[in-house]
Amino acid sequence: MLHKAIGIGLLSLLNLAHAGPSKPNILFIMADDHSKNAISCYGNKDIQTPGLDRLADGGMRFEHALTPNSFCTPARAAVLTGKYSHRNGVTHLNQEFDGSQRTFPKLLQAAGYATALFGKWHLLSEPTGFDHYCVMKMQGMAQDPTVWEKGETWVAWSPKDRKSAFKGGRKLIGYNNDVMTDEALGWIKNRDQTKPFCLLLHPKPPHAPYSPAKRYEDFLKDVVISEPATLLDDYEGRTPAAIAETMRSNRLLLGPPWQQLRKQLEKQNPGISRDELTRAIYQDYIKGYYRLVMGVDDNITRVLDYLEQSGLDQNTLVIYTSDQGFSLGEHGFYNKQWMYEPALHQPLIVRYPSKIKAGSVHESMVNHVDLAPTLLDFAGLPIPDDMQGYSLKPILEGRAEKVRDASYYHFYSHGENNLPEMIGVRTAEYKLIHYPGMDDAYQWELFDLKRDPDEMRNLYGNPEYSEVLEQMESELKLLIQSVGDPVKAPKLM
């Protein structure tokens, strides 16, 4: 009987080992242009997002997750590499990523993880570090998207040849986010189950165009959405005032997606004011945006359901974030690319039942460059010295209160859209932004985030804040030096 008992014990251990990997599975979901203010667990009252709320209820929600460069391509490169833009080589939109450099998927793959990528890529070069990928090279169509998969000849998109890159591929029939989630779930079901997996799922929405799944075409149709307090901002005393009449890529009143609507409103309502136009455009915009968010949330629910039904939920680290935040009418804006709070902040929700306390909320600042080190740390892998972020594992496990006191930001000018270069630092109480290419009167902004969370009053030059300004200039200078950014900023170098 003793020998039989030992045999049964050994067999049980073998079965347990075969049942699944000891390292956590990783499901990293990164949406495109998702404002944290468009999620009900972050306080939105206009819509309910039960999928994302469910994820937050089971893990940790970060109130201050910041992007280092609020543009799709550079933000995604920062996430992959754990490095700021000047170090990973991607500073601008539509700039090709050097796929030979070290990324967290490559390191996980080398450590025995099965790795895959589904959804929006937008880094031009062929994805590396993945056993399988199924991606849209650039934005992709909202309906029936074409995808490119590993094994097919990859032709990188370039501004000089925008056609060759889109030859070939496979068309998925259906709404973009729905069918991409189908593909991702299919990969999980058919993966090599002897290995832990790392799946990157990158939904296209809520990025424009605002073409939702059919089930949400009439969502909020007869509802009037409350306006943000700063919708009709005139930018007095702040840098946007200098380019207010040319901000087509940011300002609702001038935005190309609503010019047909604007002409229609002006024709139907002779003498309509600019403020009235802004209000009407805002309603059209925010409803379209919310419809896309609802589709994202539906698919979060589908993924969470599958994890639970398959028994994978307890050993899967799930992260939800976005490449950057987005303006939902604040300051009359509809886009990103500024260092103001709505675009600087993206959602960050992390669930791992065995390690992270359910329903927890974290208040200190974290950054996109922290995500790669965090994933490697949870996988039990060393964090390369050249990664510039910090592991958030101590915060997630309740062993640390913060990893930084200040967060660095550098947005590089984007001439076609008249967007100026911005270099800045945010602390818990203040924000300092420098615009090197602007005229002297518009080169600096200082905000007191506690007294002025909407950033309506520029305190630069205010004698009452002279000591704060000196401290913030010193903080920015130290950050520029510590991250090794070769930028030249007056008064700071």
Image: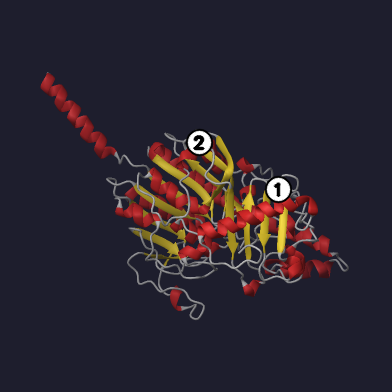
Disc 2/disc 1 C-alpha distance (Å)? 30 Å
Q: Residue furthest bottom?
A: 160
The C terminus appears in which quarter of the rendering?
A: bottom right
The N terminus appears in which quarter of the rendering?
A: top left
Q: Position of residue 130 (x, y in %)?
A: 35, 58
Q: Look at the image and tell me whether residue 244 can be seen.
A: no
Instruction: Name the residue type under label 1.
Output: Leu
Asked if residue 465 lies left or right of residue 33, the reply is: right
Category of crowding for the residue at label 2, using alpha-carbon neighbours closer than 10 angstroms: few (below 14), some (14–19), many (at least 20) = some
Q: Residue furthest right?
A: 271
Secondary structure type for disc 1: loop
Towards the viewer: 224 or 342: 342
Q: Write down the residue under mark 2.
A: 58
Q: Residue at x 40, y 41 (%)?
A: 316
Q: Write down the residue under mark 1.
A: 449
Towards the viewer: 273 or 63: 63
Q: Residue at x 44, y 52 (%)?
A: 372
Q: Nearer the viewer, mark 2 or mark 1?
A: 1
Instruction: Name the residue type under label 2.
Output: Gly
Q: Position of residue 272 (x, y in %)?
A: 86, 65
**How many discs appear?**
2
Q: Look at the image and tell me whether residue 486 can be seen.
A: yes
Labels 2 and 1 touching (C-beta < 8 A): no
Is residue 271 depicted above or below 65 in this figure? below
